[in-house]
Image (cartoon, rainbow, N blue to C red):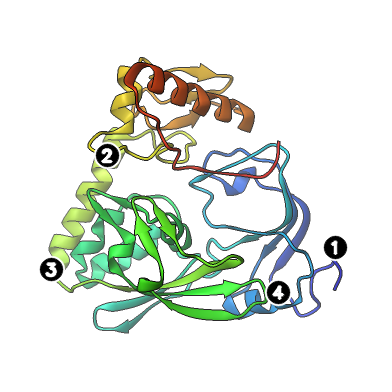
Amino acid sequence: MTNNIAPANARGIFHFDHPLASYTSWRIGGVAQYFYQPADLEDLGNFLQNWQGKLVTFLGAGSNVLILGGGIDGVVIHLRDRLNVLERVEENALRVEAGVLLTKLVQKCADLGMVNAMFLAGIPGTLGGALAMNAGAYGDSIWEYVDAVETIDKHGKIHIRKREEYKIGYRQVMGLKKNEWFVAGHLKFPLLDKNEAKEKMLTYLAKRRANQPLDEPNCGSVFRNPKNDFAARLIEVSGLKGARIGDAEVSEKHANFIVNKGHAKAFEVEALIDLIKERVFILQGVDLVPEVRILGKT
């Protein structure tokens, strides 16, 4: 194939110059030069094996990314609800593909009595995104329960990699080989009490509804929490709640959220992120590290 034609054996959905805003939780972003939604994992492997373009970007639920207005060159591979297999492989073990939404995973774990998985309740995104950034909450994180992962390389080959091959940190995972992407996780949770799991799930969901602006487009937490502190507290005491650039605004409900008040542009969100970093550093002496990934070109 050539760079502008989908492989003949592709079973998924292929687009040219495809708008990406609707695939992100901020509802912001330019276009993808090429865009592919694989039919399943096998189809993804075949696509990559035959894709001659050098640039490949994977996108899950788009809940932790800011896509710039100039869009993304190469092909964007969209996994949400595409790599969607969630299966119980042992009594306390699950194989979860990267496109599975965390809401689906949490519900499955609650039904099985996997209480320790309930910290994921209400976290937006897919398993693939959670693996890439070591998503977590309430002092827990996804890689604590990873036994192994499946990755795919730019040639479409699947690799099984053990947890020990990666260095896991707070909201970061190091050791992923260049031109490899997570396509599944093998997770293990102890089997405890189903009722306790469901009660904890509902408690965490209610807590998020009470404290986060879930009714407005957002990307979740914009900054990582610094050691022994909270980004939201630092932003709030710096007087930035309600700060606004264009239609991008620091949420009045939770200061570590930037919400789209209508028609926010990526450059407005970027400018607001920079303003927050600068103000917090000047006033609090803390250099906040963004949790959100910025993709594409201006």
Earlier residue among tags 2 and 1 = 1
Amino acid on which the number 4 mark rests in the picture: Phe
Earlier residue among tags 4 and 1 = 1
Earlier residue among tags 2 and 4 = 4
Front position among marks 3 and 1? 1
- The residue under label 4 is 47
In the displayed structure, 152 sits above or below 282; it is: below
- The residue under label 1 is 4
In the displayed structure, 231 sits above or below 120; it is: above
Question: In the image, 17: left or right of 188?
Answer: right
Q: Residue 246's image quarter?
A: top right
Residue 170: x and y in percent read: 33, 50
Q: Pointers 4 and 1 in contact (CB under 8 A)? A: no
Q: CA distance from mark 4 to mark 1?
A: 13 Å
Quarter of the image with the C terminus is top right
In the displayed structure, 158 sits above or below 59; it is: below
Residue 279: x and y in percent read: 43, 18
Q: Is residue 52 visible?
A: yes
Front position among marks 2 and 4? 2
- The residue under label 2 is 227
Local secondary structure at mark 2: loop
Q: Residue sitting at 47 percent across and 40 percent down?
A: 219
Amino acid on which the number 3 mark rests in the picture: Asp
